[in-house]
Image (cartoon, grey):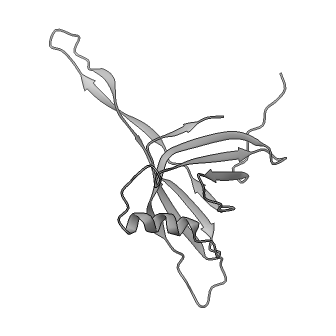
Amino acid sequence: MARQDPYRKFRYRLEIDGIEQAAFSEVAIGDAASDPIEYREGDEAPTARKLSGLTKFANVTLKWGMTDSMELTDWHRLIVDGATLQEEIRKTVVIRIQNEAGEDKAAFEVTRAWPTKYDPSDLNGTGNEVAIDSLELANEGIRRIQ
């Protein structure tokens, strides 16, 4: 069997329903965790059974260098301006990991995502770093699809 090297974490791209944001410098994929529920009936052995409870999905964080594009900040502005979380506000985000040749190889799908926090870059008159914006996405599911 041929050796399979793991994919590197610096080659990736995102697809966000209807948003043309080109690239991101960092994407933090949130974790998924199912809470255990302990249960025991009186006539059972003195150890608790563990049942699966609620599954929770952590927020996904996107970071990118500030440009003229306003699409992500406009998406967040809809929430700030009081838009309800209707279907048109929630979006599917697909994070595609690429191999060395730039081919899509692995992918994660984030479902029903909406911006919960926008953090614009700090500014410093004596600095020379790139201005980085950050957007946190609440969601209802993260799963590997490829």
Residue extending furthest toward the left: 42
Total labels: the figure holds: 0
Counting from the top left corner in percent of width and height, residue 30 is at 50, 48
- Quarter of the image that includes the C terminus: top right
Counting from the top left corner in percent of width and height, residue 61 is at 52, 57
Location of residue 28 with respect to 32 vertically, above or below: below
Does residue 138 appear left or right of residue 21 in this picture?
A: left
Counting from the top left corner in percent of width and height, residue 97 is at 70, 45
Does residue 7 appear left or right of residue 113 in this picture?
A: right
- Quarter of the image that includes the N terminus: top right
**Image point 82% across, 29% down: which residue?**
3
Nearest the viewer among 109 and 50 is 109
Does residue 42 appear left or right of residue 120 in this picture?
A: left
Nearest the viewer among 32 and 140 is 140
Does residue 39 appear left or right of residue 69 in this picture?
A: left
Counting from the top left corner in percent of width and height, residue 112 is at 47, 46
**Image point 22% across, 15% down: which residue?**
46
Choose top left, top right, bottom left or bottom right for residue 45: top left
Location of residue 108 with respect to 90 vertically, above or below: above
Location of residue 65 with respect to 37 vertically, above or below: below
